Amino acid sequence: MIWGISIIRWVLIILALFMIIDRVLKFTRRESGQTLFKLVSSVLIWGIILAISIYPDFAYFIARKLGMGENLNTLIFFGFVVVFMLIFKILSIIEHIEQQITEVVRTTAIKKEIKK
């Protein structure tokens, strides 16, 4: 352990820093599919992981400030709820894209049939 930090915490710190830098570079290079929302959400999530890796008591501080008391399990449960909400949001976006693709394919097929 270097400076009292375990290996797993070092791995998380390095991973979080890498992910934050990677997202910022992708956004500044204007790579396709990179939006401000993706940048902010990625930096926020990895920033929280970084903060908790460096300062493990930060999770307890957040739990107390949110009125969850000393019970860290409540904070973990809250994290799962947020993850499931994001999954459902992604699924609804995928469904919307599928509907748009279906509409484009139908329109293209009708136009090709009319030209014949």
Image (cartoon, rainbow, N blue to C red):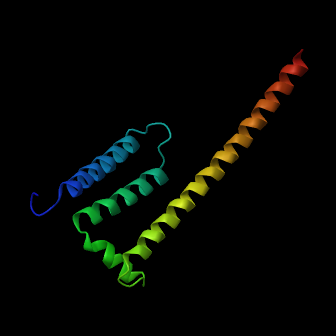
Q: Is residue 107 left or right of residue 54?
A: right
Query: Where's residue 48, x and y in %?
Result: 34, 63
Q: Nearer the viewer, residue 59 or 97?
A: 59
Question: What is the quadrant of residue 2 in the picture?
Answer: bottom left
Q: Nearer the viewer, residue 19 or 73?
A: 73
Classify residue 62 by image quadrant: bottom left
Q: Is residue 10 left or right of residue 66?
A: left
Residue 38 percent location from the top left of the image: 46, 51
Q: Quadrant of the C terminus?
A: top right
> At 76% across and 33% down in the image, what residue appears?
104
Q: How many marks?
A: 0
Question: Above or below — where is 8 with respect to 65?
Answer: above
The percent coordinates of residue 74 (x first, y second) are: 44, 76
Residue located at (90% from left, 21% from top): 114
Indicate left or right for 41 with 48 as reference. right
Residue lying furthest top: 116
**Up-down relation of residue 105 to residue 64 (above or below):** above
- Identify the residue shown where x is 88% and y is 20%: 113
Q: Where 96 sits versus 75, above or below?
A: above
Q: Nearer the viewer, residue 98 or 63?
A: 63
Question: Which of the pair 71/17 is nearer the observer?
Answer: 71
Q: Quadrant of the N terminus?
A: bottom left
